Amino acid sequence: MPTLLLRLVGPMQSWGTTSRFDQRDTGKEPSKSGVIGILAAAQGIDRENWMDLEPLTRLVMAVRHDRPGVPKRDYQTAGCAVTDNIIKADGTSSKDGVVSQRLYLADAAFLVGLECDERSLLERAHSALCNPVWPLALGRKSYVPSEPIWIEDGIQDASLQAVFARWPWIASLRKWEAPPEKLLVSFESKDGSGVMKMDQPLSSFAERRFGARFVRSEWIPFP
């Protein structure tokens, strides 16, 4: 079964699945909805277009934590000074300040794999990542990747487990650190075992409906 690989590396990443209003969370790894969103942006699939998005949601995903990153918090304010006015969502002016806390991962590097029987679907996605229709981001529009998401020879004729076991480490080694002895991998479970995550797209991104999927984690030797 072929596998498509993506490289998600950047100074800031955020993969929220439970964000509400002014509090924006992030998971410890890329969400499936976020990764599918990257593929949709690369192919120019509109937010209201479920017909073209739906095949991508059937891909089986796994994530290798090559560098887990450090959880950070970005404290933001808008219109909090006495003399400030801000424009609300309904277009009216307000003197009430807004405080927003946004969590993110700093200095993370993830190798993402997507698996399916339909090789042509992966080939279209791979080609689009090389020449995307719309800009690609790591969870938020301002969090741009520091390395290309597209990977040369990124389609491999092997399972997720086999590809992750042999693919080279994508994180660059710093002078003060040694390579890890093992890497954490999160596999999408096909039998309902593992941890439940509410990031499976059930509709177009305009409707924002997400369902449950299950993810199991295991350690693999450093490739």
Image (spheres, rainbow, N blue to C red):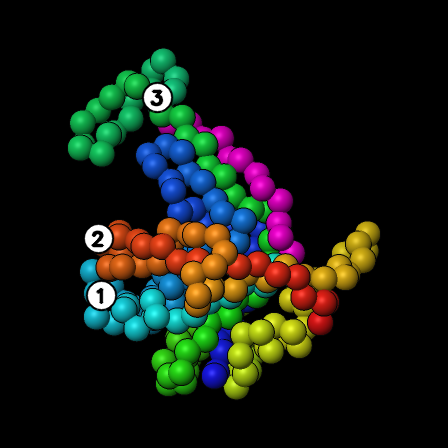
* Residue at image mark 2: 207
Q: Secondary structure at mark 1?
A: helix
Instruction: For mark 3, give the secondary structure.
Output: loop
Element class at badge 2: loop
What residue would you read off at disc 3?
97
Which residue is more in the foreground, 39 or 137?
A: 39
Residue at 72 percent of width and 67 percent of height: 221
Quarter location, residue 214: bottom left
* Label 1 vs 3, first from the N-terminus: 1
Please name whichever residue, 208 or 62, is drawn nearer the observer in this view of the structure. 62
As drawn, the label of residue 216 is none
For the residues labelled 1 and 3, the Cα–Cα distance comes to 37 Å
In the displayed structure, 79 sits above or below 154; it is: above
- Which residue reaches farthest top? 82
Residue plotted at (53% across, 79% down):
159
Q: Position of residue 211 (x, y in %)?
A: 32, 54
Total labels: the figure holds 3
Calculate the distance from the C-alpha at mark 3 to the C-alpha at mark 2.
29 Å
Of pointers 3 and 2, the one earlier in the residue sequence: 3
| Among the two numbered marks 2 and 1 on one chain, the one whose residue lies closer to the N terminus | 1
Kindly report which numbered mark, 1 or 3, lies closer to the viewer in this rendering. Answer: 1
| Whether label 2 touches label 1, CB < 8 Å | yes
Query: Is residue 171 or residue 78 the one in the foreground?
Result: 171
Say what amino acid the circle numbered 3 marks. Answer: Gly
Q: Which residue is mark 1?
A: 50
**Residue 77 vertical position relative to residue 117 in the rendered view, above or below:** above
Q: Which residues are magenta?
A: 67-78
Rendered residue at 31%/59% (across/down): 201
| Disc 2 residue type (three-letter) | Glu
- Expressed as whole percent of the image width and height from the top left, the position of residue 193 reads 47, 59
